[in-house]
Image (cartoon, rainbow, N blue to C red):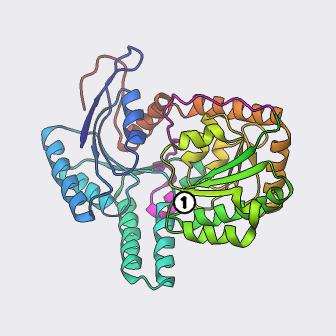
Amino acid sequence: MNDEVHAGAGGRRRERLSVLGFTELRPEELRDPLLAADARATVVELDPDRGVPSRCYRQAVDGVRALRGDRYDAVLVYNGAGPMGLVAAGLARAFGVPLVVRANGDLLRQHRERAAAFRRERVWTRAVAYAAYAFATWLTYRLAAGVVPVATSLEPVLARQSGLPPERVRAVPGPLRPGRTPRASDGGDGETLSVLSVTNLGYEGKYRGARAVLTALAPVLRAREEVELVVAGDGRYLEDLCRDRDRLFEGGVRERVRLPGFVDDVAACYAAADVFCYASDIDGYPNVVLEAQAAGLPVVATPTYGVTEQVTDGETGVLVPATDRAAMREAVERLLADPDERERLGRNGAERVARENDPAVVGERLVAAVAALVGASLTEGEAEGPS
């Protein structure tokens, strides 16, 4: 599906960056910032539920139609993962338009780890598929004019993977759509206290993090009958996490460790929680941390990649070493015992998200980064269309 984006920002008009975008993941994260920043863009949304050949065919057809019908300053591919990145690179090369990759994490590492996991399980077709995805992602980076990761800490990683000089890799954080209302603290009224984690159990690194949360908080759950733990998320490692729970907990304690799998209304989970606890060793700039902060939850997290840019220790949350489960347990215990501190950290986190992750703020930075990478000149004045 193509979305034409032609919007003004605050009544000011300028020469607008013209972008052809491709995405098969959360299209609003690409579309909304461009819309808010007054970019002129066509965003081609690919259905992730369709097969790879079908997606590539649709991407090629829509891309050729768009590039034949208009002039663009950049082809912008969101994530650039696998075949989608190669098709975007081919279109960019064929029509002489610079390619820019918008990367929301260390995709090359994620594909390689998945390929390795399937090799260990001797699922050879999936292992080969993810190895091919890793190669296609690497090649897309190598063909790009620039990369825009979601976290500053990813800049050296992606510069090394792409072979680009550091100035061709420019970080811009991910957006979060406004509209979530921060929850109020329960004030420690003696009701159930809920610790929440939301994750994608399709990734081994996120499964390791969820398992660390279960292990770290086991003493808390055994000692305090009013505390429950909810780990929401689906994926191939959900059964493994269920077995971890059954191994760690018994009887009534086990009943207070809920693993609901996929949750359609995740906002309700945030609203019902008191503390958000998240661990992962592969996330670039996890949306779930932004969502928890926007909901006014105090966040306890491990400092992986862009998490350190989302959470300032002691101000907008608590950072604990990835391997220090005692530190994670103690941080959660302190917050469960101190409703005022929960309220303070939750309020600060919500204010930070509103200030730094609003689509309009992210959009201005994204447009400036892409323009700099492709050499487009943006000047104030009447909009003249794409240069």
Binning the other alpha carbons within 10 Å of mark 1 as few (below 14), some (14 to 19) or many (20 upward) gives some
Q: Nearer the viewer, residue 106 or 238?
A: 238
Residue at 68%, 70% in the rendered image:
246
Give the extent of the magenta segment: 158-187
Above or below 15: residue 370: below
Residue tagged by mark 1?
157
Q: Quadrant of residue 378?
A: top left
Residue at 50%, 38% in the rendered image:
175
Coordinates of residue 3 in the picture (x, y in percent): 26, 36
Residue at 65%, 53% in the rendered image:
230
Is the N terminus in the top left, top right, bottom left or bottom right quadrant? Answer: top left
Q: Quadrant of residue 52?
A: bottom left
Left or right of 16 on screen, residue 113 = right
In magenta segment, residue 169: yes
Above or below 342: residue 211: below
Q: Is the magenta region chiefly helix, strand or loop?
A: loop
- Kind of residue indicated by mark 1: Val
Coordinates of residue 33 in the picture (x, y in percent): 42, 34
Q: Nearer the viewer, residue 189 or 285?
A: 189
Question: How many marks can you see?
Answer: 1
Coordinates of residue 308 in the picture (x, y in percent): 67, 48
Coordinates of residue 155 in the picture (x, y in percent): 54, 53
Left or right of 58 on screen, residue 187 = right
Element marked by disc 1: helix
In magenta segment, residue 285: no
Is the C terminus in the top left, top right, bottom left or bottom right quadrant? Answer: top left
